[in-house]
Amino acid sequence: MTQEVLVRNLGYVEYIDAWRAMQRFCDRRDPSTIDEIWLLEHPPVYTVGLRGKGRELPNPLGIPLIHSDRGGDVTYHGPGQIVAYVLADLRRRSWGVRQLVSGLEQAVIDLLAQHGIAGERRVGAPGVYVHHKKLAALGLRVRNGRSYHGLALNVNLDLRPFASIDPCGYKGLEVTRTLDLGIDADVARTNQLFLPHLLRNLEYQQSHTTVSVGVSA
């Protein structure tokens, strides 16, 4: 069976708007609904996953903070970071969460390998690391066998807001970005390079791409 996916390039979207839209998509989809991947950037925002539920954080920069229903702990999103949300029917594909996490991580590792850079996984700490610094963070939610949320890949965003948090709940964890690794490509170009790796590792054989502004209400 050919696995199809619709890829949406959404531009800049407020986190809360994307989150609610993902929930609506999952609630309304049926067994015949094609999976979707949303590629976008968020305005500056801290998000706290279920592992950090109820925690308040010092926020000297005054960046909005949202408690989300994704897995994981606290992270930062901002312009210059690729966010890839994967809205997949895992039950239909007979996939588990671990397989989805592995595919997302491997897509980043393959992107890095394309540029001669070694990316690494860490046991018990999903994401991709280079020289012990975190480059890509993962946070997923699966409800009724359907996934949403996904992956954030640092391209050329301002890293200073990470200094006010313990990224992903790990004290002292440093972060990095593809720009600092010698990959001279902006978000648009990195999206072009990254998408084939993402589709291959998530085993989508046929894709359709659309460009739109924001998400529907």
Image (cartoon, helix red, strand yellow):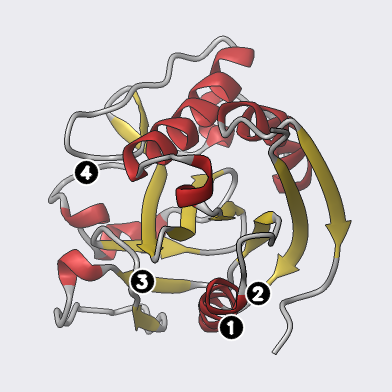
Q: Earlier in the sequence, mark 3 or mark 2?
A: 2
Foreground pick, 143 / 179: 143
Q: Residue at x 53, y 64 (%)?
A: 78
Which of the marked residues, 4 or 1, is nearer the chain's N terminus? 1
Residue beneath the point at 31% across and 26% down:
121
Disc 4 to disc 3, C-alpha distance: 17 Å
Choose the circle earlier in sequence order: 4 or 3. Answer: 3
- Quarter of image, res 32: bottom right
In the displayed structure image, the side of residue 96 where residue 40 appears, left or right: right
**SS of the residue under disc 1:** helix
The label number, if any, that marks residue 17 in the structure image: 1
Amino acid type shown at disc 2:
Val
Q: Is residue 206 visible?
A: yes
| Spatial separation of the CA atoms under disc 4 and disc 2 | 27 Å
Residue 79 percent location from the top left of the image: 61, 62
Q: Position of residue 140 (x, y in %)?
A: 38, 57
Q: CA distance from mark 4 to mark 1?
A: 29 Å
Residue placed under numbered mark 4 in the picture: 173
Query: As shown in the figure, which amino acid type bears the numbered disc 3?
Result: Thr
Q: Check the image and name the residue furthest to the bottom.
A: 217
Tell us which disc is closer to us: 4 or 1. 1
Q: Position of residue 170 (x, y in %)?
A: 15, 49
Q: Secondary structure at mark 3?
A: strand
Disc 4 residue type?
Leu
- Mark 3 to mark 1: distance in Å? 13 Å
Of the pair 177 and 24, the residue shown nearer to us: 24
What residue is pinned by disc 2?
13
* Tag shown at residue 47: 3
